[in-house]
Image (cartoon, helix red, strand yellow):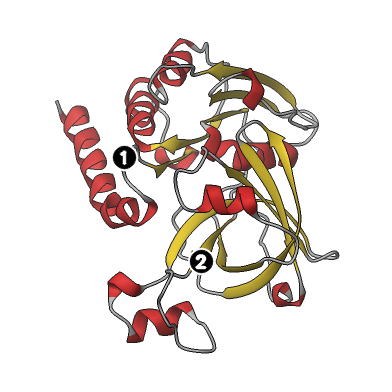
Amino acid sequence: MAEKPANQHRGVVLRSEWISRNMVRLVIGGDGLAGFATSGMSDHYVKLVFPREGVDYPEPFDVRTCRETMPRELWPRLRTYTVRAWDPDARELTLDIVVHGDSGLAGPWAARAEPGDEVVMLGPGGNYVPDPAAGWHLLVGDESALPAIAASLEALGDGAVAHVLLEVDGPEDEQKLRTACEARITWIHRRDRPVGEALVRAVRELEFPEGDVHAFVHGEAGFVKELRRHLRLERGIGMDRLSISGYWRTGVDDEGWRAVKPDWNRRVEAEEQAAVAS
């Protein structure tokens, strides 16, 4: 997720719905979204803002002001989520949020969210949409990438071809995906294996169709690194045809991952360059 969202918006939860065992859908609206606008990307995202308990923030509440006037340890926490859908006429924003019990920050909040609950967010950002001129599309990810992949499938029209590989915990986490394109959708059940292990194997074993591919590969950083190396070095896909990023990293919270991600990306690029040179 390359762009840094700047605009702050204040909405309210309108309704919620469990769409699979571990994913809840929140629809957010209200007059505070009057200035919200997307630009056609299928990986648009917002950063949900969570004030820290017991901290008195300047009023009116503004994330930029907090960062300019308060110590870093008191800054509100941010959690990044893909815009599953945006209806500008109804002024309704849909977010699909993964919930793993009581672990994490945004997941438990989303599981308990009720109509009328206030939501402060920054955004939207985003920089990917499937290229309609591509010969075919490769869409790969875990649960964190599922909303963006679902939105990308909906953006693909009749005549497009997509190979989709999605890793989730089990069959109860699968979703019905809508698309007008010719899509081969493979659900991979993780069970007790490490995140991404089976997904990497499936991509390596995939017989690529002929023609120019436009690929979208996102999720846990460890398997994303493996697949980036495979797609770049073994499959010969150029970075201009590849949207790939670690949305999260096992054992690191969102703040921690954002802090180290730039250096992590530089190391990955350096390793790839060294491999090409050798």
| x 41%, y 20%: residue | 200
Q: Position of residue 44 (x, y in %)?
A: 60, 54
Residue 185, which numbered label? none
Across and down, in percent, residue 7 comes to 56, 75
Mark 1 or mark 2: name the one nearer the start of the chain: 2
The percent position of residue 154, horizontal first and vertical second, equals 74, 39
The correct choice, above or below, for 60 with respect to 123 in the image is below
As measured in the structure, the alpha-carbon distance from the residue carrying label 1 to the one carrying label 2 is 21 Å
The residue nearer to you, when weighing 89 against 115, is 115
* Residue underneath mark 1: 251
Residue 153 percent across, percent down from the top left: 70, 35
Seen from the viewer's position, the closer of residues 18 and 207 is: 18
Residue 49, numbered circle:
2
Quarter of the image with the C terminus is top left
Image vertical order of residue 209 relative to residue 50, above or below = above
Q: Find numbered disc 1 in the image and state the secondary structure of the residue it sits on.
A: loop
Total marks in image: 2
- Residue type at tag 2: Val
